[in-house]
Amino acid sequence: MATYTLLHFTEGMNSAGVVDYAQRLESLGYDGVWVPELTGREPMALAGFLLAHTTRLNVGIGIANVYVRDFVAAAQARKTLGELSGGRFWLGLGVSHPILVEPRGHTFIPPTKALGEYLRGIHATEPDGPSHSESSPIICAAHGPKLLEIARNQADGALCLNQPAEHTKRARKILGPDKKLCVVVRTCFEENLSHARSLARHALNFYIDLPAYRRTWKQAGFEESDYKDGGSDRLLDAIFALGDIESVKQRIQSHVDAGADEICLYPINPREVLAPGQVGGLDPDWEALEALAPGS
């Protein structure tokens, strides 16, 4: 049976709103929340804040950029937050993309080399103090087969974003039965399918031209024509969960049937108008989150 978590940017909330957000997710029965690293709040600090204001909710970094902090700092954060939260911290790691890495002054290197060396560094690092690192799993953003193999061999699982259920099936085969497979599913609870696709295109705008995503979509049978004008209907319908609540649930279930043991919901709020270039909505779609909550 899959667990359910959530990914959402918190920059539209003040500190009290962030606490309410996390505690509300906890009361709805969600297993955890992932906080992104892109712009805005520093994710390690935010994770500590959320862990301090919840009692059961797991908190993960989704996804910490390996270029931003060295492996010693990541090992320290993993151990500290794991210890202080009683094992409720998840360290999500990823190699990001050149357009996000190079403007910060870093040189982008082959992803398998970057992630493999970083993980080996973490495992070789043993910060001083009580040992609780074994209860703080490392989950790697991984889509291609080589990165998935690294997640299998050197981490506790993988996190996949913007992928069809066919990719979930391939990822499970590579990871094997014992590693966590977290699939991030972007949902849009909007019965007007044309409007839902329009919102999905806006949400995909940041990712549609990234080579790493195009490589994995190509393996699923998509081609250059599917990337024009913000994405074809065929592409959007495969990687988003769009429509009424039953259609959304069916798309989510397709990932569970393909081997996902964690579904991370990443809802598009259809009642919120997004600014050009805005990655996510400021307000969570609580209507969707309540309808999709565990046990609902």
Image (cartoon, rainbow, N blue to C red):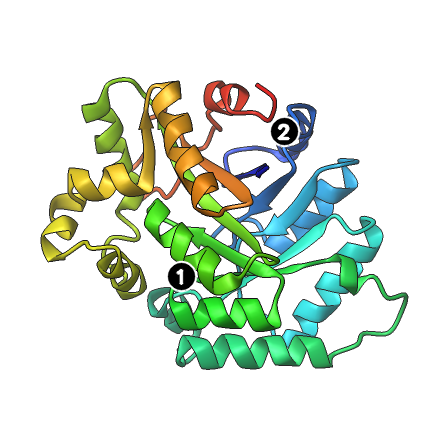
Residue denoted by label 2: 25
Q: Quadrant of the C terminus?
A: top right
Q: Is residue 190 visible?
A: yes
Q: Residue furthest right?
A: 130
Pointer 1 or 2: first along the chain: 2
In the rendered structure, the answer to whether residue 218 lies left or right of residue 255 reads left
Image height check: is 42 above or below 243?
Answer: below
Residue denoted by label 1: 143
What is the total number of numbered labels drawn onto the structure image?
Answer: 2
- Hey, which quadrant is residue 30 in on the image? top right
Q: Position of residue 287 (x, y in %)?
A: 47, 18
Q: Position of residue 169 (x, y in %)?
A: 40, 52
Q: Is residue 38 visible?
A: no
Check disc 2 and give the amino acid type.
Leu
In the rendered structure, the answer to whether residue 4 lies left or right of residue 89 reads left
C-alpha distance separating marks 1 and 2 = 28 Å
Residue that appears at 72% across and 81% down: 124
Check disc 1 and give the amino acid type.
His
In the rendered structure, the answer to whether residue 141 lies left or right of residue 41 reads left
Between residue 120 and residue 76, name the one nearer to us.
120
Residue that appears at 74% across and 79% down: 125
